[in-house]
Image (spheres, grey):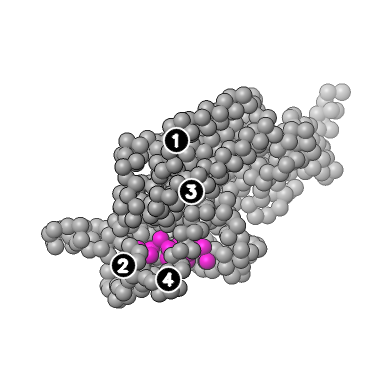
């Protein structure tokens, strides 16, 4: 192993970690993004306002999809900080930073301190990890809940290697077993039983390749599994109370739906085999190309590191004399294969194993000989400069407010990139990539996303209503015909509106709402026009443009063609026609 530690002091490490934490924290500034982020924010808002931590509701009805744990955390944050963007995103950022700390500790168990430092910095700067702290879903919560148990269980496996007293070592082992099981239980209550694969697959592969297969027979691991499921009892209880006790509820268009069965089977195996109520269209190579951009700027060293390790295993060059650990390879690859074979795929799914990818990448970089390290530093710098050029082109195309400030931000960081990190060594490689990702994160979160998210019509309408007391103090009806959780821009209205909201999914439900008098109704312009032909009188109060900002296109990015991509939403005052006619008669 090549020693680069002379060029990588603790002072530099802590400084780079601080910058890495800051670039991820820029994700706190943009509003909550539609669709999933706004939906999750609304579910937790309902929980915090009602004090009902058992039942999950979305669009005014029972919601059976994700487990409870993230919503409990977010609702608690709402109780502390109020219901706002910061309180929704801040817990996720803390969990993400927890995954960085666990990655450092896990790496230090079998690699050098330098490798642990590099792994932490790689994780702080992987693109989709940074993005997940702006468009917050479940993944930031899962990251420490997966690498954390692996760390604690690995400490149990290593036994009293780090202690001198056998009694003290045994108590420490049981403590690690208990904490690992607790974190595993929380992971189960965040995503379901499939989290056991990234947690357990790497450990099993490590034991098999290093000749410790008898670990599979030891009682302590079965105790850990039992404890992990015991810690999920709160989730099982909630599902039983909301669904299994009420078979009359209509869920997914049918009655007799078991929440517990959904948790253990339909939400996991149903999605994998595409036989459950929530379906997708899987592509076996989806994550091969997705990981190339999701793990930028570290994609190439990651792929090469994985390739080298797989080659060693294929040539039967494995064991502790060849690699210190195979956990990172096992967990990272098993999860990659699992999601690639699944019938339901989304780009952010692999974020949960980014800590393992960071370890693989760090080991590859630290073991480079000086000549090869210099070449890699230059190559990565070229990639970084290209990313900055792309970001400048994007800023110039979008023309966000504060364009001059944004370009100044990019120029300043680019100059610092080369002034502070002149040599082609490991410190310069890490420093340059952090500077590049600070350019990207700052440009996206401080300039571009604020421009894009103005076209979340629901949020814009809620801001408009909140500033007008006569409107803010009365309920708003969200008219969205159909079934299921819907979509569009209704969730961002529900989250950002200070006043009460109620959903109307049918004309009859809307009639019930307006029967007692006129109501403020938020809906699409198309739906508003259709209401006028079905017995309602619609008076438009304001119109707001909408675009699905998580699916960007060139026409939307370009201000010259943006208007062609927008759909109008309206805030209207809606009456029954008979009532409006009576009003006209009274005036006459």
Instruction: Mark 2 and mark 4 in contact? Answer it, CB < 8 Å.
Output: no
Q: Nearer the viewer, residue 476 or 248?
A: 476
Q: Earlier in the sequence, mark 2 or mark 1?
A: 2
Distance from disc 2 to disc 1, alpha carbons, whole Å, reads 36 Å
- Indicate left or right for 165 with 536 as reference: left
Spot occupied by residue 186 in the image (x, y as percentages of width and height): 40, 55
Distance from disc 1 to disc 4, alpha carbons, whole Å, reads 38 Å
Q: Nearer the viewer, residue 55 or 384?
A: 384
Q: Is residue 175 visible?
A: yes
Residue occupied by mark 2 = 321
Dividing the image into 4 quarters, which one contains the C terminus? top right
Q: Earlier in the sequence, mark 3 or mark 1?
A: 3
Distance from disc 2 to disc 3, alpha carbons, whole Å, reads 28 Å
Let me know if residue 328 is in the magenta part. yes
- Indicate left or right for 518 with 44 as reference: right
Identify the secondary structure beneath mark 4: helix
Q: Earlier in the sequence, mark 1 or mark 4?
A: 4
The segment highlighted magenta reads: 325-338
Residue occupied by mark 1 = 422
Name of the residue lying farthest toward the front: 371
Residue occupied by mark 3 = 375
Residue 313: mark in rendering = 4
């Amino acid at each position: 192993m090549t020693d680069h530690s002379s060029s990588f002091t603790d002072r530099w490490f802590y400084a780079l970690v601080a910058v890495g934490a800051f670039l991820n924290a820029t994700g706190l500034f943009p509003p909550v993004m539609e669709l999933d982020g706004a939906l999750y924010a609304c579910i937790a808002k309902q929980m915090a306002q009602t004090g009902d931590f058992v039942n999950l509701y979305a669009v005014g009805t029972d919601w059976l999809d994700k487990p409870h744990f993230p919503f409990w955390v977010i609702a608690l944050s709402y109780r502390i900080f109020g219901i706002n963007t910061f309180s929704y995103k801040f817990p996720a950022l803390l969990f993400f930073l927890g995954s960085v700390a666990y990655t450092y500790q896990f790496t230090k168990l079998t690699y050098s301190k330098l490798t642990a430092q590099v792994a932490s910095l790689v994780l702080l700067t992987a693109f989709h990890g940074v993005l997940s702290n702006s468009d917050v879903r479940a993944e930031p919560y899962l990251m420490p809940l997966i690498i954390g148990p692996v760390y604690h269980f690995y400490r149990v496996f290593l036994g009293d290697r780090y202690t001198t007293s056998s009694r003290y070592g045994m108590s420490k082992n049981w403590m690690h077993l208990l904490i690992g099981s607790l974190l595993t239980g929380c992971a189960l209550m965040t995503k379901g039983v499939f989290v056991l694969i990234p947690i357990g697959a790497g450990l099993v592969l490590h034991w098999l390749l290093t000749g410790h297969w008898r670990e599979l027979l030891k009682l302590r691991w079965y105790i850990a599994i039992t404890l992990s499921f015991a810690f999920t009892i709160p989730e099982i209880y909630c599902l039983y109370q909301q669904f299994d006790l009420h078979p009359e509820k209509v869920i997914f268009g049918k009655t007799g739906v078991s929440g517990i069965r959904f948790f253990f089977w339909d939400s996991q195996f149903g999605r994998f085999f595409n036989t459950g109520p929530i379906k997708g269209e899987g592509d076996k190579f989806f994550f091969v190309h997705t990981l190339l951009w999701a793990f930028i700027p570290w994609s190439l060293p990651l792929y090469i590191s994985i390739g080298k390790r797989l080659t060693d295993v294929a040539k039967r060059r494995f064991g502790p004399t060849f690699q210190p650990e195979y956990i990172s390879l096992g967990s990272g690859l098993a999860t990659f294969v699992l999601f690639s074979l699944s019938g339901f795929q989304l780009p952010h799914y692999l974020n949960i194993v980014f800590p393992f990818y960071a370890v693989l990448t760090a080991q590859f970089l630290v073991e480079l000989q000086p000549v090869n390290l210099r070449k890699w530093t230059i190559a990565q710098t070229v990639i970084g400069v290209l990313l900055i050029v792309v970001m400048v082109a994007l800023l110039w195309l979008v023309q966000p407010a504060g364009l001059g400030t944004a370009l100044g931000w990019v120029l300043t960081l680019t100059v610092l990139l080369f002034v502070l990190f002149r040599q082609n060594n490991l410190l310069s490689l890490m420093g340059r990539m952090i500077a590049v990702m600070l350019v990207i994160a700052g440009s996206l979160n401080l300039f571009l996303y604020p421009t894009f998210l103005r076209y979340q019509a629901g949020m814009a309408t809620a801001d408009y209503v909140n500033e007008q007391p006569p409107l803010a103090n009365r309920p708003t009806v969200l008219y969205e015909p159909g079934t299921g959780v819907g979509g569009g821009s209704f969730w961002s209205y529900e989250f950002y509106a200070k006043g009460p909201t109620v959903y109307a999914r049918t004309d009859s439900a809307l009639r019930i709402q307006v029967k007692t008098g006129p109501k403020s109704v938020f809906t699409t312009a198309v739906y508003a026009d259709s209401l006028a032909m079905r017995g309602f009188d619609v008076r438009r109060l304001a119109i707001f443009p909408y675009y699905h900002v998580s699916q960007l296109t060139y026409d939307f990015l370009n201000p010259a063609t943006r208007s062609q991509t927008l759909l109008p939403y309206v805030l209207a005052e809606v009456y029954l026609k008979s009532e409006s006619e009576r009003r006209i008669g009274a005036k006459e």
